[in-house]
Structures are given as C-alpha cells and as structure tokens.
Amino acid sequence: MPAMSSPLVLIFYEKLMPGSQMVNRLQDMGYRVVSTTDPLKLVDEVRKQKPMVLVADLETKTGDVPDSIRELKEDLETQHIPVLAFANLEDEALHERARVAGAKLIAGRDGVLDQLSHLLDHVLEMD
C-alpha cells in the first residue's frame, strides 16, 4: 500500500473498462487512487479528498461531468486541481464543453490508458 505521501489521484468512471484498468495503472505508477462511480457525488468527493489531479470520464448516464468540472473551477478551494478528462474522440461537442468548463486536457478514450503517464505529466505541468 503506498505511503500517505504518495500523490492522490481521484478518478471518476462509470464504465468498468477502461476505468478499473486506469486505477491499476495509476497505482503501478506510484499514485494513491480514490475512485468514484457516482457523477452526482463527484464534486463532493473532490472537496473531501483534495486530490492532486482529477481524472474523469466525460461520458455518464446519470450526471453531467462538464458541469461538475465547471463547479470545481468556480470554487476557490478546488479551482487549482487540474482535470484530465476523456471521452470518445468522435464526441467533439462533449470535448468542447469540458474544455470550456475548465478541463486542462481532454484525451480520446481509446488512447488514454496507453498514454496515461504522458498525459498526467502534461496535466501536472505548471502553467
């Protein structure tokens, strides 16, 4: 089990794949990982956990992840937390909504697992 000093990543996903694979990959990379599968609790989880980064699947049946990102970016307590979002590349409207809401990087679902280390490095770079 990683030490408490390991950086914390909060990941939101509803679909088991690639969600559970991403949790395993993040742990292999040395991160502590907390996951949530309830989009309606996403904002509260971020506030409670205070992760170094949020990784979020934009595609959900029951919530609106871009709205959650917007809420986090409007909150002084959470606006500094970078967001790596992912969705199918074909859903350009969803990508654009996430970008406007404040996601730092939006990746395609198909490549996100293979590129996770590179994507996280990019998201965590200082502006």
Image (cartoon, rainbow, N blue to C red):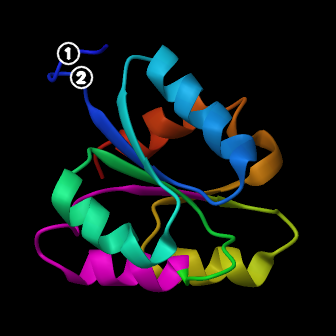
| Side of 49 relative to 82 (left or right) | left
Q: How crowded is mark 2: few (under 14 residues within 10 Å), some or many (20 or more)?
A: some
User: Looking at the image, is 76 positioned above or below residue 49?
Assistant: below
Q: Looking at the image, which residue is at 72% across and 42% down?
A: 18
User: Looking at the image, is 61 positioned above or below residue 119?
Assistant: below
Under circle 1, the secondary element is loop
Q: Which mark is residue 27?
A: none
| Side of 76 relative to 85 (left or right) | left
Q: In which quarter of the image is residue 97?
A: bottom right
**The stretch drawn in magenta includes residue 78:** yes
Where is residue 66? Give x, y as percent: 52, 80
Q: Residue furthest right?
A: 90
Nearest-to-viewer mark from 1 and 2: 1
Q: In which quarter of the image is residue 6?
A: top left
Q: Where does the N terminus fall, quadrant-wise?
A: top left
Where is residue 123? Give x, y as percent: 43, 46
Where is residue 30? Give x, y as percent: 38, 17
Looking at the picture, tell me which residue is in the foreground, 49 or 89: 49
Is mark 1 in CB contact (under 8 Å) with mark 2?
A: yes
| Side of 20 relative to 101 (left or right) | right
Residue highlighted by disc 2 = 6
Q: Which mark is residue 3?
A: 1
Q: Give the range drawn in magenta.
A: 65-85
